[in-house]
Amino acid sequence: MNAIKTQSTEELLRIVAEKREALRVFRFGGAGSRVRNVRDGRNMRREIAQILTEVQSRKSEQKK
């Protein structure tokens, strides 16, 4: 979590885009076969949410 706070907003948005693409590949890659580690999807979604929360809090701080 500390690594998220030290990075710039642009870098965080780039990471979110990469993680969303990885999640998409994870979802559709396992459509034809069983995915062995289903927690990977949950962890990716959680990381995306944490990053977006940090970006949103930075935007709200800038408005004040």
Image (cartoon, helix red, strand yellow):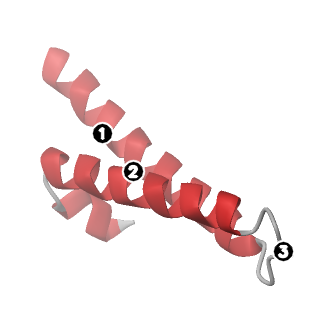
Q: CA distance from mark 3 to mark 1?
A: 35 Å
Give left or right: position of 52 versus 34. left
Q: Which residue matches tag 2?
A: 51
Q: Residue at x 14, y 46 (%)?
A: 10
Q: Which residue matches tag 3?
A: 33
Q: CA distance from mark 1 to mark 2?
A: 6 Å
In the rendering, which numbered label is found on residue 20?
none
In the rendering, which numbered label is found on residue 55?
1
Q: Amino acid at mark 3?
A: Ser
Q: Nearer the viewer, residue 28 or 13?
A: 28
Helix, strand or loop for disc 1? helix
For the C terminus, give its image quadrant: top left
Q: Residue at x 13, y 52 (%)?
A: 8
Mark nearest the camera among 2 and 3 is 3
**Residue 30 falls in image quadrant:** bottom right
Residue 23 image position (x, y, % from top left) = 56, 59
Helix, strand or loop for disc 3? loop
Mark nearest the camera among 3 and 1 is 3
Give left or right: position of 41 versus 9. right
Q: Work out whether residue 64 can be spotted.
A: no
Q: Work out whether residue 57 can be spotted.
A: yes
Q: CA distance from mark 2 to mark 3?
A: 30 Å
Give left or right: position of 62 versus 55. left
Q: Residue at x 17, y 55 (%)?
A: 11
Residue 6 image position (x, y, % from top left) = 18, 62
